[in-house]
Amino acid sequence: MSRFIESIRLEDGQIFLAELHQQRINRTLRHFGSSAKININEILKSVHTGDSGLFKLRLVYDLKEIVDVKIILYIPQKHTEFQLVENNTVNYNFKLENRAEFQQMKKAAPGDEIIVVQNNHLTDTSYSNLIFFKDKKAFTPHTYLLNGVQRQHLLYTGKIISTSITLGNFTDFTHFQLINAMNRFGEGIVYPISAIRGLL
């Protein structure tokens, strides 16, 4: 049976974007025909969330129930080089626990992180969505592998713009940033576009 993960930002005892995380869990269960009820608010009642600092609340679940709950101190990753990797078949519409295909792509790439390219369009890194900057505006590829909760939130609030970012135009942007539930807009490392290496 497939298992799925949900990684939720927990900072100084406060949970972020819980509603969007709940919606994703609900969509996943419905898509696979499950009638299970997995409620984030109920889970929160059973775990200690009061410590100060930044933590990842990691939920692992299957189509019947929650399998595992962990609260992990979160330390953001810092990368030096991003390798463009073409893979037109990888499918990550649902946040699966099994990430073997991403691990294989990373292992084969010379950089310490990858950006997956599908049909000449940039999508995501192995664990995050992307934001690109140009003329004081922020853009995200309209092509993505996973429509992350942070990406959804930023689009809903008008902080970023969805657009076509391709092998032919990504160098028109000046900088980029990785975003996900743990890495928010304007808080993480902003990389120069020169940190992206060409397609293998």
Image (tube, rainbow, N blue to C red):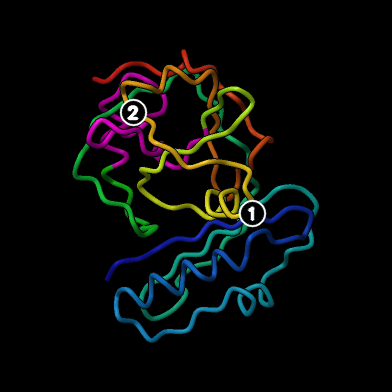
Residue contact at pointers 2 and 1, CB within 8 angstroms: no
Vertically, is 16 above or below 135?
below
Residue 50 is tagged as none
Q: Quadrant of the N terminus?
A: bottom left
108 vs 19: above or below = above
Outermost left residue: 89
Relative horizontal placement of residue 188, taking residue 173 as reference (left or right): right
Q: Which one is earlier in the sequence, the residue at label 2 or at label 1?
A: 1
49 with respect to 21 (left or right)? right
Locate residue 91, reporting x and y percent: 26, 51
Residue 183 screen position, x and y as percent: 60, 42
For the image, the number of numbered tags is 2
What residue do we see at 37% from left, 20% from top? 111
In this picture, which residue range is highlighted in magenta? 102-131
Label 1's element? strand
Circle 2 — which element?
Answer: loop
Q: Label 2 amino acid?
A: Thr
Q: In which quadrant is the C terminus drawn?
A: top left
**Residue 129 shown in magenta:** yes
Q: Which mark is residue 9?
A: 1
Q: Residues within 10 Å of mark 2 (few under 14, many from 20)?
A: some
Q: Position of residue 165 (x, y in %)?
A: 39, 31
The residue at 34%/82% (across/down) is 34
In front: mark 2 or mark 1?
2
Residue 164 is inside the magenta segment: no
Write the residue at 47% across / 42% down: 162
- Could you tell me the amino acid type at mark 1? Arg
Q: CA distance from mark 2 to mark 1?
A: 30 Å
Residue 75 higher or lower than 52, as above or below: above
- The disc at residue 166 is 2
**How far from the left and from the top, in percent, is residue 139?**
52, 35
- Locate residue 184: give its quadrant: top right
